[in-house]
Image: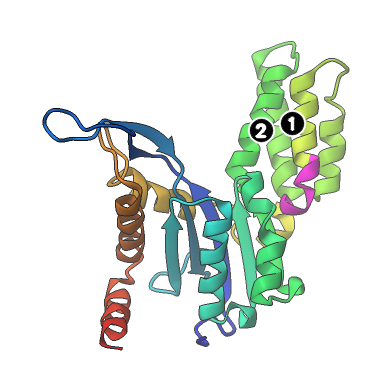
Amino acid sequence: MSNEADGKRLAVAMDGGRVLIRTNKRGRKTAKGYHTYVADWREPKLFIIYELDAEGRKMRKGLERCDGTIGGPEDITRLLVAELRAMGAQNAKSITFLGDGAKWIWNRIDQIIEEVGIDRARVSTCLDYYHAVEHLARVAEAKTFASLIEKRAWLDNMKKLLKKAPPAVFLAELAKSRRRGNAVIRREYAYFKTNMSAIDYARLSREKQPIGSGAIESAVRRIVNLRIKGAGMFWKQENAEAALHLRCQLKTNNWSMFYADLLNGLAA
């Protein structure tokens, strides 16, 4: 365990991508000696940990770690817990967990906090603001308005309330849109109510915390989409796992440290 995270403000985010994994079919090989195979889409899961500057933005040349796996939610959670422990994240000044609302992420935050030993008073959770706005737009599409101008005015007002008002005030206004039989609006209202503790954007902004998960979305694009996912590209699982791990180190400028640790491990 190191003291890298001591007194620092950190953000943590997880997300997934898509990659084709090749699996050989059982049975005899072809006349040319090859196995037939199937290629199924799998979701590689990534996490990113990064240091925040005084304004809540990702710090240039600050502490940054990233890793991923083709495994499931429990596998990426184990990797994240190990990385947070290794950097001494329990001694960080604050930690903000960011996400798009996926249950496999939110349902494991308490587990991560407990296993790392983080003081819950130092932890904030934030539903990505831009994902939240997408859900608001679905409500606007499901509502009935007299004109397009009225629809846009309603959506603009709700976006302002979402960003500037306490969550209870926003939810009270959104509740006025619920109508019996309108399943879309009722579902979206339930979505915001379930994530109520993670949509306090006014408080997060006052505390100079991030309200968007752009860092992990960028990581998925650079690490997965631009190299591991591609037209006609598929991988054996062990090769995809290795490529994912190596690109995580490369794209977060940790290659030299990773290479030195690898050499030290081989020497030992």
Magenta region includes residue 194: yes
Q: Are marks 2 and 1 in contact (CB under 8 Å)?
A: yes
Is 158 drawn above or below residue 180 in the view shown? Answer: below
- The answer to whether residue 186 is seen in the rendering is yes
- The answer to whether residue 56 is seen in the rendering is no
Identified at 25% across, 32% down, the residue is: 28
Residue type at mark 1 is Glu
Residue nearest the viewer, comparing 195 with 103: 103
Residue 38 falls left or right of residue 35: right
Q: Which residue is mark 2?
A: 135
Magenta region:
193-199
Residue nearest the viewer, comparing 69 with 62: 69
The Cα atoms of the two marked residues, 2 and 1, are separated by 6 Å
Q: Which residue is mark 1?
A: 188
Circle nearer the N terminus (2, 1):
2
Give the x, y percent position of residue 253.
32, 69
Is 166 drawn above or below residue 147 in the view shown? Answer: below
